[in-house]
Amino acid sequence: MAKKNNSAVSDAWYTSPGASQDVVVSSCSTLRRNLANFPFPAKLHESETDRIQSIMFDAFNFLPDAAEYQAVSLERLDDVGRKIMHERSILDSTQATKGGIIMRNDGRIACTINTDDHVVMSSYKSGLGLDETTRSIYDIDCELQKHVQYAASYDFGYLTNFVLNSGSGLSLYSVIHLPACSLLQEVGNLAQKLSEEGFDLRARYGSGGFDNVSGYGSRGSALGAYYRVTTKSSAGGTEVEQLASMNAAIQEVIKAELSARKKCRSARVTEIANYTYRSLALAKSSFFINLKESVDIISGVKFGADIGILNGIESSELHALLYRVQDGHLEYVLNTGKFKFEKDIQDNKAKQIERLRALILQESFEGIEKP
């Protein structure tokens, strides 16, 4: 396994096409494990922290495809690298400086060491693919258990720092796009139904507020109508049962959104066209676009493409843009490339990032046309 001490990123998984991408942006399966005979990370001494990291870095070297993985200590990862890891949902915080990351070159597999738990392994996939992400993460877990011993009990299963993550240690989520349900004000009922079934529906990018491009926003609404469906607990049922239940829940969400889009096509198409064309016009005419605006712009274009009032761009391209327009990703591109900006922003990095974001959106939308 190669050692990595910079913030370079490899070809990313989120650029690939996936199943049900008209509604589902991405899928993720996560396993949480702790090594036997060590306290949880918050109680570790420095020597124990170093020991656990060394054990896990070494254990990954025994994987059949070990050469495809790279390891880095968070202390050696720069600020931009931490931002990127946060934007990819690998790190919970951009301020994390303790622990380590092991990541496959395509980013589909990532493992944090000594963050919330000793080992947090995640597998990612574009579109709907929880069966695949869960299978891949368990394959790795089985290999690692040949070389490390996890903390577990017959009564509670695998032991974790947070009690609801104990048991299987498996947590699942899918990022979904619900513009039609949002327009028809059906998200609240959907969230309640999911909660009763043991799942949370949460905003992916925070509140849209009152000033988002679409004009659909209200306080507490999800920016761009992007949400995450997540499991509430790892403690109930077997891994197979938890996965089956989650897949059923996602299928319910897909069915609800597609039904809502059908209603919108017949009854609200002018509103959607206004949202879509305003989003596209803002992208094409702006010199600077902030992150909040860009998420809503992408959502508006995606909504228009999904109901057939725009052609020339695929769902996978729009989903990839959600990562490409993030601050950390843009700062990395800015630091590693050569760009010639307007004279009045040559010394203003924040404006350069907003300018670069606008240019990326404009380039991505060049082939879009009305049918």
Image (spheres, rainbow, N blue to C red):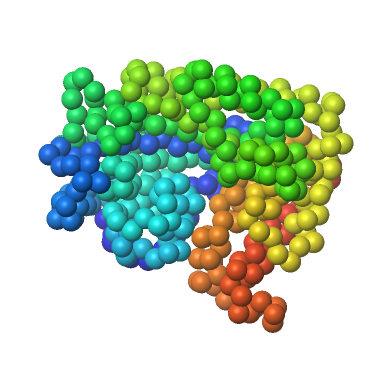
Would residue 325 appear left or right of 274 to someone viewing this image?
left
Residue that sits furthest to the bottom in the current view: 343
Residue that sits furthest to the front in the current view: 219
On the image, the x and y values in percent for residue 125 come to 48, 40
Nearer to us in this view, 282 or 371: 282
On the image, the x and y values in percent for residue 144 come to 22, 40
Nearer to us in this view, 217 or 181: 217
Would residue 225 appear left or right of 153 to someone viewing this image?
right
Q: Is residue 9 above or below residue 106?
A: below
Q: Residue at x 42, y 24 (%)?
A: 243
Q: Residue at x 38, y 41 (%)?
A: 122
Q: Residue at x 66, y 59 (%)?
A: 290
On the image, the x and y values in percent for residue 277 come to 82, 47
Quadrant containing the N terminus is bottom left
The quarter holding residue 95 reads bottom left
| Number of marks in the rendered image | 0
